[in-house]
Every structure is written in structure tokens, then in C-alpha cells.
Amino acid sequence: MKRLVDAGGSLSGAWLRLLALSGAVALPTGAMAGTGQPSPWQIGLQTQVTPIGEYAQWFHDALLMPIITVVSLFVLLLLVLVAVKFNAKKNPVPSKTTHHAGLEVAWTLIPVLILVVIAVPSFRLLKDQIVVPKADLTIKATGYAWYWKFAYPQDAGGFEFEVRMLSDEERAKAVADGKGKKEDFPRLLAVDNEVVVPVNKVVAVQVTAGDVLHAFAVPSFTVKVDAVPGRLNQTWFKATKEGIYYGQCSELCGKDHAFMPLAIRVVSQAKYDAWLADAKKKFARIDHAPVQTAHSEVTR
């Protein structure tokens, strides 16, 4: 028991993880989930930094998890009861009961009521995700085998750039050159060019693909939308906290599917303006930059 408690008198990290995995204790999601990227031993969702993400996290933690926990424990209790009370040793003469009207009504009605409870916040979340409010910035994300290309609109400079994953050698070189610490370049997530957006602004993202199916996904934003060749899908987010948030292709797209991450850096308006001025000189200008699309304000 001494190893269960650390020097500070609290449960040690290893035992907390073991207990959490076994369901013996309920740990808050934020305690084991990182912001912007996965964390070691993470169980729950990544920490959310958008209004929709926060609502989705509440939906998962406060509603779905308690429901599935109660259902699972109830089913486990029934299985144990059946194994102990109705085994062949205790019941040499099997019961000939074939049905029970009240039980049949209950196991039909109760799941329906549970689904109704889940449906109300689920439909609201779905509506908020697909109804795009008026955007402050519209960018276009195109998936290729296997990298991303991002285009900024004409009123933001009308330029585009490609995003490719940094190799282990490139990560090591970046650290050696003093561009950051090792943790600033997470393996399989760090990229050569980051998408930069201002904080507390509505960003619409037009998503398509240039070859095969891909999917644009950023877990800390609760954003995920398919990138389909010949089709222009759309999603949106409003990041309320500065930082860097990693995403990846979430559609099995081929041999290097696991190696096409993306990174979105959320900065203040002043830093965004400074980055924009530099990006206009650094990246290629294009004439087919994305334009503002139709939108509908989200109503409550």
C-alpha cells in the first residue's frame, strides 16, 4: 500500500492511471488530456478551446459517460446474477418461462427514453457544427497524398502554402538551430508551415481534396470534415485561447496517411497582422483564393 501513495500523500500517477482504466475511480477528463495534442495515458478528449468543443466535451463527460457507465454496471450486475442464481447446479430443472409482458415493455421503453435524452443536446450540437456563422476569415484546406495545402483569401493577401510533416532529422536540426525546444516539435505532428489565425475570430474552412479521400480534423476544436475530390465541404471554429493546435488527416487515404499532420497557431490580432505581412512576401500569390461563402447565423 505504501507504493500506492506518493510522498505528498496522494495517489501516484501510475496507480491513478490503473484505477482509471479499470473504472474504479472517475477522473476528470482535463486531468489526463492535453491541449492541442495528445498526452501520454490520455483517456478523455483533448482540452477544448472553442465554444462548440466545450459543449461537446460537456455532452461527453456529463451525459454520455454517466449513461453508459450506469448501463454497463447494470448489465454486469445482471450477468453476475444470472451466473450465480440460475446456473445448472442450482436449477437442475430449467424454468419454462418464455416471456414477461412487463419486462418486454420495460426493455423497449427505457432505451427509447435514453435515446430521447441523448437526442436533444446531440441535435443542438450537430446544428451548431454545420451552420456556419458570419466568418471573419475564410481559408481553404486541400488534402493531397500526403500533405496539405492552405489558401488565404484575396483580402488577406491571396496566397497559399503547403504543409508537410517534419522528419526526425528536421526536428533535431530545428532544435539545434535554436528555433525552439524539443517539446515544441512533437514527433509526427510538427510541420514546416503552420496555419495562423487570430484568437476569438470566426474562421470558416473550405475543405476539399486533390486526389483521394482525406479528412480535415483538429481534436481541440472538435472539428472534423471529409475532404472529397470535386466537392467543397465547409466547417468552422472560433478559438478562444492562444496556442498551437495539431490536427491530422482522419481518413485512411493511403501509404502515408499517418504522416500528414497540420498545425493551427492561434495568436493575437497584432501578431496575426505581423505574420500576415510577412506571409504575403514569403508564400506564393494565387488568383483563385477562397472567397466568403453563404452563411446563416446560429440561433439559440
Image (tube, rainbow, N blue to C red):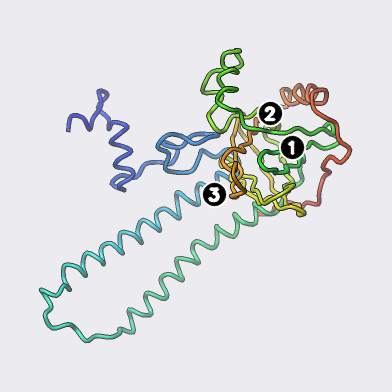
Report how far apart the C-alphas of labels 3 and 2 lie in the structure: 29 Å
Q: Hey, what amino acid is under mark 2?
A: Asn
Mark 3 or 2, nearer chain start: 3
What crowding class fits label 1: few (fewer than 14 Cα within 10 Å), some (14-19), or many (20 or more)? many
Above-or-below relation of 49 to 191? below
Q: Residue at the location (27% across, 30% down)?
A: 10
Q: Are marks 3 and 2 in contact (CB under 8 Å)?
A: no
> What x and y, as percent, mark residue 167?
58, 27
Using the image as rendered, state which of residue 177 and residue 24 is in the foreground. Answer: 177
Q: Residue at the location (55% across, 57% down)?
A: 121
Q: Is residue 240 left or right of residue 21?
A: right
Q: Hey, what amino acid is under mark 3?
A: Ala
Res. 83 image quadrant: bottom left
Q: Are marks 1 and 2 in contact (CB under 8 Å)?
A: yes
Using the image as rendered, state which of residue 124 and residue 36 is in the foreground. Answer: 36
Name the secondary structure under disc 2.
Answer: loop
Res. 107 image quadrant: bottom left
Identify the residue under disc 2.
193
Using the image as rendered, state which of residue 287 and residue 238 is in the foreground. Answer: 287
Identify the residue under disc 1.
150
Q: Quadrant of the N terminus?
A: top left
Q: Residue at the location (70% across, 43% down)?
A: 144
Report how far apart the C-alphas of labels 1 and 3 lie in the structure: 27 Å
> What x and y, as percent, mark residue 251?
60, 50
Q: Which mark is residue 56?
A: 3
Q: Hey, what amino acid is under mark 1?
A: Phe
